[in-house]
Amino acid sequence: MKKYNGFTLLELLIVIAVIGIIVAIAIPSYTRYVVRAQRVEARDTLQAVANLIEQNYRVTRNYKLMADNKTKLSDDIIKNWHMDKIPANGDARYEISFVNGSITENGYILQAAAVGFQAKRDTDCPYFFYDQSGVKMASKDNKLPEKGSRDPVSIACWSK
């Protein structure tokens, strides 16, 4: 009698089922990990932009003007610093800008808004805000939370 080497159909189906289960668990976990890592990148960039603005404020004592006392602080300045989108090259995941009307002589509010694929994947924390006094806020719907409120979305998004 001749002995055949190889796998039976049942063994092959079991291996395929095990691989399917592993993939079904691994892909969502990896996606959540990537989304959280990109949030950290957005928060870090917000703080880096705020740091540059504060360095300018030390010279001018005014958030509206740059050190030359002529140029007004605006989204164009952030663009000139190459910090208007994350990452700077390729498809943006977040865009950094000022909240409309938030730049005054005494303060500002920066915003990081998820765009593109990141906006589709990250429905928990798509908007981050940061102001001149270091107040960290976040929202799900691009509405600025009240300062001083212990907003659960802000707390959760800035701590993850």
Image (cartoon, grey):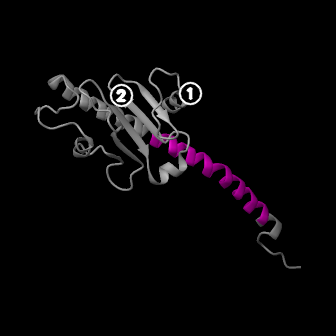
Q: Which residues are magenta?
A: 13-39
The answer for how far apart the CA atoms under marks 1 and 2 are is: 18 Å
What residue did someone put label 2 on?
A: 131
- The amino acid beneath tag 1 is Pro
Q: Nearer the viewer, residue 9 or 142?
A: 142
The kind of secondary structure the magenta stretch mainly shows is helix
75 part of magenta stretch: no
- Residue sticking out furthest to the bottom: 1
> Picture quarter containing residue 57?
top left
Sequence-wise, the earlier of marks 1 and 2 is 2
Name the secondary structure under disc 1: helix
- Residue sticking out furthest to the top: 148
Mark 2, other Cα within 10 Å: few <14 / some 14–19 / many ≥20: many
What residue did someone put label 1 on?
A: 152
Mark 1, other Cα within 10 Å: few <14 / some 14–19 / many ≥20: few
Q: Residue at x 31, y 30 (%)?
A: 108
Q: Which mark is residue 121?
A: none
Relative to 47, 40 lies left or right: right
- The amino acid beneath tag 2 is Asp
Q: Residue at x 56, y 27 (%)?
A: 152
Q: Residue at x 19, y 29 (%)?
A: 56
Relative to 133, 154 lies left or right: right
14 part of magenta stretch: yes
Residue 67, horizontal then vertical, whole percent: 13, 31
